[in-house]
Amino acid sequence: MYNSLLMSKTERYENKRSFIGIPPYDRIPIDMVQIALTGRDVPLTILIADEFQIMNGMNPENVKKYTSELQKMFDRLSLVYDIDYRTMLCSDFMHGSAYRDIHEDMRNTCNGLHKELFETVPEKRRNDPDPMRYALNELACMRFMAENGFEAKVGPEKELQYDSIAEIIGIYLDYYYLSPAYSLGTRYPVSVVHYVPTDRKGGQRIMIDDELYTIKARLMLGPKNANMYFCQMGNAAAEALGNQTEEYLHLSERWMKKRSVSLVLNNIIKPLRGELL
């Protein structure tokens, strides 16, 4: 079941020392549980991208606060699902000389890849004084991790842009992708970035600290692909807890919504709140 939460682009991912970069935000989406459960497939390090949020203009005090909250959540996920994570902060190494050397090398190496790098920049930031600053640091972090013993990078499929450039310039990592996360309440299936709470695409997201009635109501919004995703994640969480999994693939849309509610509440929300421990 856990393998269904993680897709491999390259080789089998068993025992590959892996990392995933997660920026801290003011809210933590429930989809973070999917990321947590991939730690049962691979030795996973959570690389908290605090420096990248400062690059994005977030107040440094807020970055510090949200980083602490994210670390506490992964401590909780580790306890509930019996997964051993290591946590790193980008700020732990991005101000050091070794990283600065790698970053400068990246800037020189990527001179001929201006078009590819520019395509990774969100439109609202393309007129910034240094629009490719974020992308260059993304690649520099990947090289830093590769040079420090990491063999694979985990992330949402939207990071294919960075990963493709990394392969061109010889950053030797395997790349694994999370199964898509979905917004709720949209007319058609719309994928969202797991760890970005504001990425809704016109729909609704579930946060780990939402009220139970809010979680139930949003799960009942559909569409069917979103409910399949939440059933899948709920079953993976059930397996981690030693609970019974539940069939959902052959249910009608109405009953799949109900099944997603029971799986999510019983195997994710209540355990994380200490109700079933």
Image (tube, rainbow, N blue to C red):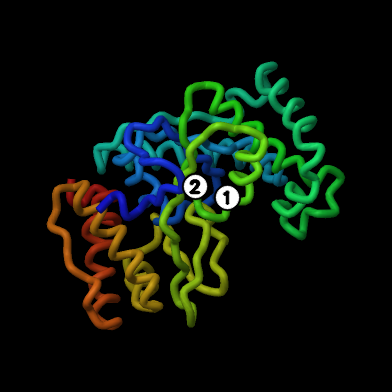
| Residue 91: quadrant of the picture | top right
| Residue 146: quadrant of the picture | top right
Q: Which residue is mark 2?
A: 155
Could you tell me which residue is drawn at 70 percent across and 43 percent down? 135
Circles 1 and 2: CB atoms closer than 8 Å: yes
Q: Is residue 68 visible?
A: no
Could you tell me which residue is drawn at 68 percent across and 45 percent down? 58
For this rendering, which residue is in front, 92 or 207? 92
What's the CA distance linking mark 1 and mark 2?
A: 7 Å
The answer to whether residue 258 is left or right of residue 73 is left
Q: Dot 2 surroundings within 10 Å: few (below 14), some, or many (20 or more)?
A: many
What label sits on residue 46 in the rendered view?
Answer: none
Q: Position of residue 276 (x, y in %)?
A: 18, 50
For this rendering, which residue is in front, 203 or 138? 138
Could you tell me which residue is drawn at 74 percent across and 47 percent down? 117
Q: Residue furthest top?
A: 97
Q: Position of residue 49 (x, y in %)?
A: 58, 38
The answer to whether residue 229 is left or right of residue 173 is left
The answer to whether residue 113 is left or right of residue 148 is right
The answer to whether residue 172 is left or right of residue 105 is left
What label sits on residue 159 in the rendered view?
Answer: 1
